[in-house]
Amino acid sequence: MSLLALLLLGVTGCSNALYYMNVLSGHAQLLNAQRPLAEVLADPALPAQTRKRLESLQAARDFASRELALPDNDSYRSYADLGRPYAVWNVVATPPYSLKPKQWCFIFVGCISYRGYYRREQAQTYADQLRAQGLDVQVGGVRAYSTLGWSDDPLLNTMLYRSEARRVGIIFHELAHQQLFIKGDTTFNESFASLVEQEGVRRWFLAQGKPASYQIYMEEHQRDVRFKQMLLQTREKLQKLYRQNIDKKQMQKGKERIFSELKQIFARLKKNQPAFSVYAQWMAQDLNNAHLALVATYYEDVPALRQLLKAKQGNLRAFYRAAGELAHEDQQKRRILLRQWAKNRL
């Protein structure tokens, strides 16, 4: 999956100014490392596997604009090898007895629920500072991000997934952020990009004449959905606990019990269905509220947006226009409309 990093923003305060200087420096280094894709593909020293994946992404980039009506610009038409597994590392934090994530607010994009770093050690240092304040914290690697058209984003080595569906899907997802972005509404933005990604992958495989590959993608997607549902059920248990009028000692014991139950449930699931072992490394972490804070972000509004796409007879341009009208509504009205759409009341 992918998260949106924040770049090119104004700032006040010495500590924030230093943060933004590091962010701008990291993005500048990324841009300096890029080379035109045609030049990269013409390099005889390019590994065969990398060549094959880049050629697939080049075709997917053209498909995105031609068939999915996504922005036709120079984003993802160059390549940069960062020499690391992730483009950025995001820090998420919550209070110890709440699932509401800490917000960081910026001039051009509003408030979001994470803070990104180009260097893992910087992310860890900031995470340690938040832990010292008593917060639950997670540091997670992110393979790609969008600058929302402020600069031409390159393809990255971190985007070269083994799975073709994930490779092309990340292109569609990030371009969807350029197509539509509502300031301050992370859940809508990520859900919109996820819906475009899912629909784009479906159309890509159908156009490629690869129904078997699409079936594999759908099986993986359904597995992801089931895993997320398990996490959402744990969130509900925690939210119910945190609403109780009990002392912190009792609440802490309840919290530990619920996370222990989550690990037990996953262990049984993995034993019965070995395919779920792909989540074993993530589940092996010392899980806390921050790991569950954003679990619904990429999916919560997808059912509503899928109904909207259906109402537009699959016409993506019409869908983008209709979804874009939500940008003119305040967030409360937007949530009401999305709930209505999810119930087929368009």
Image (tube, rainbow, N blue to C red):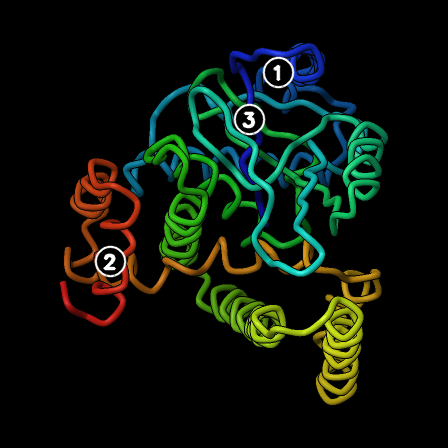
Residue 110 occupies which quadrant of the picture?
Answer: top left
> At which x and y percent is residue 333?
22, 50
Which quadrant is home to the C terminus? bottom left
* Residue ID for mark 1: 39
Q: What is the total number of numbered labels drawn onto the structure image?
A: 3
Mark nearest the camera among 2 and 1 is: 2
Mark drawn on residue 21: none
> At which x and y percent is residue 309?
23, 56
Mark closest to the chain's N terminus, 3 or 2: 3
Residue in the image at 65% along x and 30% along y = 156
The kind of secondary structure element at disc 1 is helix
Looking at the picture, which amino acid does disc 1 mark?
Answer: Glu
Q: In this orientation, does residue 219 appear? A: no
Judge whether 218 appears above or below 127 on screen.
below
Residue 311 occupies which quadrant of the picture?
Answer: bottom left
* Residue ID for mark 3: 6
Q: In this orientation, does residue 191 appear? A: yes
Looking at the picture, which amino acid does disc 2 mark?
Answer: Ile
From the viewer's side, name the closer residue of 68 and 176: 176
> At which x and y percent is residue 330?
25, 41
Dot 2 alpha-carbon crowd within 10 angstroms: few under 14, some 14 to 19, many 20 or more: few
Mark nearest the camera among 1 and 3 is: 3
Looking at the picture, which amino acid does disc 3 mark?
Answer: Leu
Mark nearest the camera among 3 and 2 is: 2
- Compared across the picture, whether 33 is left or right of 297 comes to right
- Compared across the picture, whether 230 is left or right of 269 comes to left
* Residue ID for mark 2: 336
